[in-house]
Image: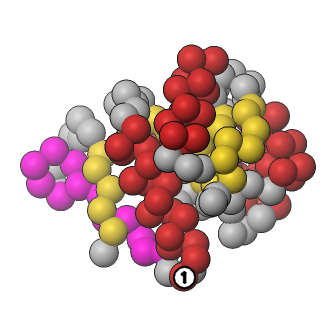
Amino acid sequence: MARVLIVDDALMMRKTIRKMIENAGYIAEAEAINGEQAIQMYKEYMPDIVTMDITMPGIDGIEALRHIMAYDKDAKVIMVSALGQQYKVMEALECGAKSYILKPITAENLIAVINQVHDKSKTNAFTKPVFECGEGRHQQSCDIIVGKTV
C-alpha cells in the first residue's frame, strides 16, 4: 500500500488525515509541520504520495511543492486548500501538484483523491485538469474551483 507524507501546520488536521488514510489501508509514513520539514522528510522517506497544506508559516505549501518537484519530477503531491484559494490551487497544479482537496476534508473525498493519484501513478497516465468556476467556464468571478480530468 502507498506510503503518505502528511504536511500541515495544524496538529488536529494532521491527526485527522492520518486516521483517514490509515483506516483506508494506507501507511502514514511521516508528518511535517511546515514546508521546510516537508522538503527534508520527502528526501529522507521518498513517500509515494504527499498531502500538503497550501497555507503554512515560513515556507508555504506551494514553495515546498516547487522544491520537491525540483528534487523529484515524479512526486505525487496532493494540495490541501481552504475555500477561496482557487488561484493558489491553480498555481500549485501548474507547479506539478497532481490533485487537490478542499477543506473541510471528508474521508471519502480524501481517499478518492489519493486512490486516483496512486492508481494513475501506476500507469503514469496523468491527465490535465479542466477548471470550472461557478456555473460556467467563462465566469469572471470564481467562488470555488472544481477540478475535472479530461
Count the marks: 1
Q: Residue at x 22, y 48 (%)?
A: 133
Start and end of the magenta stretch? 126-137
Q: Say above or below: 114 vs 51.
A: below
Q: Residue 38 location, x and y as percent?
A: 76, 39
Which quadrant of the figure has residue 52? top right
133 drawn magenta: yes
Which residue is drawn at the image coordinates 61% and 27% (left, top)? 14
Residue type marked 1: Thr
Residue 102 relative to residue 6: left or right: left
The residue nearer to you, when weighing 5 against 127, is 5
- Residue 136 in the image: x percent, y percent? 12, 54
Residue named by callout 1: 123
Judged left or right of residue 104, residue 12 is: right
Task: Tell me the SS state at disc 1.
Answer: helix
User: Which residue is depicted at the point 57% across and 72% down?
Assistant: 121
Quadrant for the C terminus in the image? bottom left
Identify whether 57 is placed above or below 99.
Answer: above
Where does residue 55 sit, x and y in percent of width and height? Answer: 57, 29
Q: Crowding at label 1, few (<14), some or many (≥20) Cα neighbours within 10 Å? A: few
Up/down of 95 relative to 86, above or below:
below
